[in-house]
Amino acid sequence: MKKVEKVLAFDMGGTKIASAFVEVDGSGYKLSGYKRNPTPKKQADIIDIFVELIGEYRSEYDFDRIGIAIAGQINKEGDTIIYTPNIAMARNFKLGKTIEQKTGFPVSLRNDVRCFAFGEDRFGKFKGHENAVYIAVGTGLGGAIKINGEFFFGKDNIAGEFGHMIIEVGGEQCHCGRKGCWERYVAGPGVEKLYEKAYGREKCAKDIVYDAVRGVEKDRAIMLKASYYFAVGFSNVVNVLDPEIAIIGGSMVKEKKLLRLAMPLIKKEVLPSAKKVKVFNASLGDKAFLLGAAL
Ligand SMILES: [Zn+2]
């Protein structure tokens, strides 16, 4: 019988920290004790909440290590956040090392989109492909690349930052310092900006997607525009990497609208040889991030 891995997993975004006790064996997983807490603004408070939550889980569950998914760039060693757009002051934040010192558990940090990819790749409905790309569209847009059966990380562990590929030269300012990045047109804040520019008022991305799905013309027009940008960027990725399969997840595609609108455009934009790529919505939802953090 295969050994069961017992891990306390976290998924930290700009607004919330999700957590669960995860048991993983060769073929399956079990998630227990799911919790959701707001993400504090200060580094010291972030460390405090992790230490507190680890203490709470410890009284109920028996785990050997801790895995944390984070929206941002993580160093190769998996102990430091090099950069995250979501948490103010979080540059070279030694979150992993500090929690290790305070709790005695080994801690590994990992980019959240990579966690999503690992989770889907191991347990999702479309698992087991040798050549795949994973794209998550939420507050930002990130990706992960699998080549010949192995995930590809790059020299500095940042391969797959598709969201910062420029698709509109001289376009919208991105938090990365460049202009016209893909995520500025497809991820939540980018879609909000498209709406504001078109209609002169603000509306949150969640509502834009919701109303577009229900046929409100103004919102549909914005989602059509975002879908066009999605199709252009996605086709670039497919043309470069030639994957068998692409799995798309994240809050912006939960309603499937973005992908459905984008598919005919994608078929036009990809090279003839890339037309056979299979494109699917992710199958595990938010769970994929916690599962990937535990692997
Ligand atoms: Zn950028």
Image: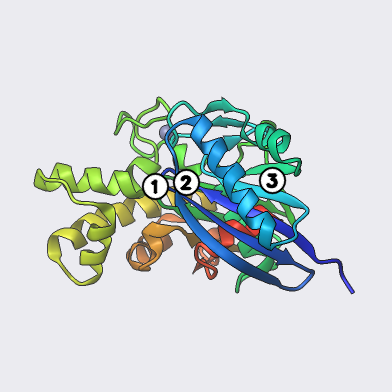
Query: Between residues 116 and 109, which one lies in front from this camera angle?
Result: 109
Q: What is the secondary structure assignment of the residue under circle 3?
A: strand
Q: Amino acid at mark 3?
A: Phe
Q: Which residue is mark 2?
A: 13
Contact, mark 1 vs mark 2 (Cβ under 8 Å): yes
Q: Position of residue 150 (x, y in %)?
A: 74, 53
Outermost residue to the front: 59
Q: Which mark is residue 152?
A: 3
Label 2 to label 3, Cα distance in Å?
Answer: 23 Å
Q: What is the secondary structure assignment of the residue under circle 2?
A: loop
Q: Is residue 38 left or right of residue 80?
A: left
Quarter of the image for the N terminus: give it. bottom right
Q: Which mark is residue 139?
A: 1
The residue shown at (25%, 69%) is 213
Label 1 to label 3, Cα distance in Å?
Answer: 23 Å
Q: Which mark is residue 51?
A: none
Q: Position of residue 208 (x, y in %)?
A: 23, 58
Q: Nearer the viewer, mark 1 or mark 3?
A: 1
Q: Nearer the viewer, mark 1 or mark 2?
A: 2
The residue shown at (43%, 30%) is 88
Asked if residue 174 shows in the view, the reply is yes
